[in-house]
Image: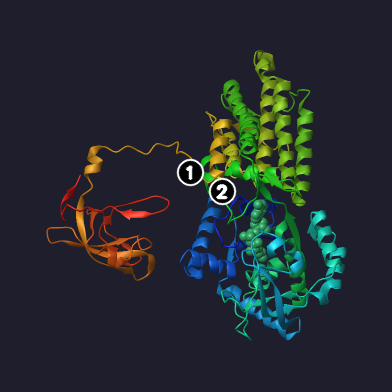
Amino acid sequence: MKKTFYVTTPIYYPSGKLHIGNAYTTVLCDTLKRYKNLLGYDTRYLTGMDEHGKKIEAVALERELSPIEHVAEIALDTQALWQRLSIDYDDFIRTTEKRHKTVVQKIFEQLLSEGDIYLGTYEGYYCMPCESFYTETQLGDHHTCPDCQRETSLLEEESYFFRLSKYQKRLLKFIEEHPDFITPETRRNEVLSFIRQGLNDLSVSRTTFDWGIKVVSNPKHVVYVWIDALSNYISALGYGTDGDHMYQKYWLGNEVLHVVGKDILRFHAIYWPIMLMALDIPITFKLHAHGFYMMKDGKMSKSKGGVIYPDTVLERYGLDAFRYYLLRELPYGGDGLFSPDAFIERINFDLANDFGNLLNRTIAMVNKYFEGQITSQLEHTTDYDGDLVKTINEVKKEYQESMDTLKVSLAIQAIWKLISRTNKYIDETAPWILAKNEKDMKILENVLYHLVESLRHIGILLKPILLEAHQNLFSQLGIEPNLQTWESYEFGLLKTVHVVEKPTPIFPRWDVAKEVESLQELIRGKKVKKTVKIPEVTIDDFSKLDLRIGEIIASKPHPDADKLLVSNIDIGHGEVRQIVSGIAQHYQPETLIGKKVIVVTNLKPVKLRGVLSEGMVLAGSNKNTLEIITSSQLNPGDLVK
Ligand code: MSP
């Protein structure tokens, strides 16, 4: 039977677009899952969204959407982003799903009936953006939030409390007896000293808002964020239901890993194990808390801006460059900087020069000297073969040790050690000199064989990290699938090589100054000037459009979409069209009556949220406003050219 590996990311708040910091955790877990797959594990990867809470309700309100509409939209965007990042998750849990709610309600009632949760009152200074209460001593000057420096307000409310204090000793003992429960060690020490200061009981319900899971036995309360959120790790496995085979298989399986940012360490290292203890569920997980990606000007925040979003970077520089940078640049245990200079330099030096060039040169030489085909010639040795093979073997060990201890940046550095060693091997053996002498041809073939063999090993190690480049490498070198596996990481298994005729560079090199500037503009929130020109059209293309003046004779809100209006427009010659337009946020329907507008009359009819639209009204917009283009002198049916 295969060993199991269950890995989870935090579930993200749908409070805004996810930034590269959030993407880091997700990419890291993806890499760990792929690594375990490489080793032959049976893996399961869970990610998702933490959709309840006052803050989410407020963000939805601001967008004039209901909370459920808002979270549904962000969940779709997030899944689309993970798809673009090739995240191989197996399940995406949303806390608004029934399968989750049922489990949370059951857990809450169980804790209540066993006396681990009790009713009390809560008074504190509440910070809405952070969804946290603080005591007066924790606040900054003017009662501001110690985390985000925004204003707090004093609230008192009835609340259920979770008896953390009851489990303090047991948790301390558990952490002391399991030295690798929390990594890195510095984080473990932080948690230990926090627990030793004494745990206060935790407020776990709210009555001041209702965008949450209701407490079954007292529905004026909703379950407050952490019991709701943390339970996702087992609700997604069907815990507590008839269909709990995933829970049996993965939670009670061999390895369970929660990866979180340092910001939510305490919740996972203290509340979650205590919840499990109280519920009599085994604590099978290990917890890894990584540091943060920072911008030059400080922390990234979904609400504050000054950050960089994955889609824009991905679109321009590609999936592997982005994944590589994220995984390589954040040091184990510490924070890292997302810096445009370092980003472009890493692509140019590590990916294009060191790695891409090695592959290119190797293929070019196999073509040039052996018409693309070589076989293993191990008896025709050079003085440098031994050391190269030794590095191949050593690097495997280093890589595995680093990956097993979640030091992915170090694992990548181990791969680059092999890449450098292989590049050095070219300098040492100087194939171009060997090629000058007919009698050295076998040695030359042996040298090229070593290069291809080394690249094959590099490809295997890169499988969890560079998703497109490793495939590219294998296909350009003509490596069969059975020699791309972890089991085939053994020098000499490759017998014959047949490379592509024309190598294609796997990473382009970028102009540092230009790219750094456009990245900086992106960070400042400006749109980069598009390098692609807007395509030209001919007068014939333009004249395909039938543009006419139309007069709006009726208009009303769309029955199912807040942003749309449905108008009836007289376009002359006795014809009236029904047209749906996205202008409801800018115009009251009754103010449109009598306006003479420009209509695209030969646009193919479509249904917009179930209502037929037979044309389009032209409008102009900028970032502040939107305005319909109107005419005063012309009449319905007049042509616009
Ligand atoms: N909803 C909670 C988590 C509940 S888990 C049961 C939450 N969500 S969040 O949207 O704020 O995402 C937090 C996570 O995103 C962090 O824990 C971390 O994993 C990741 N990151 C957020 N900013 C980050 C950086 N700047 N750098 C690296 N990771 C970052 O907290």
Query: Between tags 2 and 1, which lies in front?
Result: 1
Q: Quadrant of the C terminus?
A: top left
Residue 241 visible in image: no
Q: Is residue 603 above or below residue 154?
A: above
Q: Earlier in the sequence, mark 2 or mark 1?
A: 2
- Which of the 4 image quadrants contains residue 211? bottom right
Give the camera-side residue of 333 and 93. 333
SS of the residue under disc 2: helix
Image quadrant in which you'd find residue 274 = bottom right
Give the quadrant of ligand 1: bottom right
The location of residue 277, given as percent across then percent down, is 78, 74
Residue 605: percent from the left, percent from the top?
26, 59
Mark 1: amino acid? Lys
Nearest the eye: 509 or 142: 142
The residue tagged 1 is 527
Q: CA distance from mark 2 to mark 1?
A: 15 Å
Residue 354 falls in which quadrant of the image? top right
Residue 325 vertical placement versus 625 (above, below)? above
* SS class, disc 1: loop
Numbered-mark total: 2
Query: In the image, what residue occupies the spot 67% across and 36% down?
Result: 494
Residue 91 appears at what percent x and percent y?
A: 59, 63
221 sits to left or right of 560: right
In the rendering, which numbered label is found on residue 310? Answer: 2
Q: Residue at x 72, y 44 (%)?
A: 409
- Can you say which quadrant of the picture contains the N terminus? bottom right
